[in-house]
Image (spheres, rainbow, N blue to C red):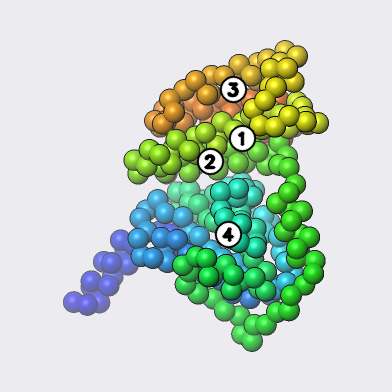
Amino acid sequence: MNTLLETVAAANLPHQFELLETSVEALSHSPAVQSLHIRGSLATGTADRLSDVDLIVAVHDPSFASFVQVIDALMTAELGAVLPGWRDTIVARMGGLGYVYLVAYGGKLYQVDLYIVPVSRLDTVLARTAAMPVYLADGATSRPHSHVDWVINSTLERPYTSGELLVEILVLGHMIRKRISRGQRFIAYAEMFALHTAVKNLIKAALAPESLFYGWYQLSEEIGSTPIGRQCLADLERLISGNAVPSGQDLAAALSTALAVAERAAPAILEPLRPAVDAYWHYLEFA
């Protein structure tokens, strides 16, 4: 009877547990990785079928810069990430770098959050978040490396490119869809505003890259002086005039508008991502 119950329980676990196992196997193959810790709902036992896989990846300090450079390729090749990673601006600054990946697994699209931290700062991260160890390399030791500060600070301070902003928009769309499904109206509102801001930032990065104005200031003056700029601002106006708390239909319309803005303002960034965007739409619709 116990075996039967265990079989039934295993069959009904969220697929994220399988994805977690696959993620740990892929990431632990790198000699740069000292340890992996799971945090979030999978660590606390509150996961549902929409939950993220949220991992802390502790990397030996001397290997930190090179690991960050190859993580997109690793996630694509080993785990089937649909898009490049989004450099997470939501996660708290704890001494490392956060990235969000959308991974196709078992016919659905899942969110995998990686917080990549130098081993020398792992204790600081673990003190600030509940986490469980899921991998520890044999004889793992690491010395602090002075280059780590430069890598982290320069990455956090570097402005997003138009291509990175497009990835941010798509990742936020996936997150908002989850909020809508769960009825999390406050978070859906906050993340929809973040999506609008990312579209605005994409327009500025593409059409006014040397802008000296902060945030939403002087958009009409800077962007509205050309026909393309005026069309982009009209799309942005339509976006921000929608429902503050979106429905699924609102979200689909907003994403379509955002992609139209990207194609108009920065077509070169969209072209190489078209297969990824097509896959994204497929999974977003049928996940």
Sequence-first tag of 3 and 1: 1
Mark in the foreground, 2 or 1: 1
Sequence-first tag of 2 and 3: 2
Residue at point 47% right, 30% down?
Answer: 252
Inspect the image, locate mark 1, and give the three-letter code of the amino acid beneath it.
Ala
Task: Point out residue 273 in the picture as x, y percentages from the top left corner.
Answer: 66, 39
Sequence-first tag of 4 and 1: 4
Is 18 drawn above or below residue 240 in the view shown? Answer: below
Residue 110 left/right relative to 29: left
Which residue matches tag 4? 114
Task: Point out residue 276 in the picture as x, y percentages from the top left corner.
Answer: 61, 41
Task: Tell me the quadrant of the picture where the N terminus can be found.
Answer: bottom left
Which residue matches tag 2? 172
Q: Is there a contact, CB below 8 Å, between mark 2 and mark 1?
A: yes
Sequence-first tag of 2 and 1: 2
Sequence-first tag of 4 and 3: 4
Inspect the image, locate mark 3, and give the three-letter code of the amino acid beneath it.
Leu
Q: Residues within 10 Å of mark 3 (few under 14, many from 20)?
A: many
Which residue matches tag 1? 198
Report, in whole angstroms, how far the alpha carbon at label 4 lies from the one at label 3.
31 Å
Task: Tell me the quadrant of the picture where the C terminus can be found.
Answer: top left
> Which of the 4 image quadrants contains residue 165?
top right
Residue that sits furthest to the left in the current view: 1
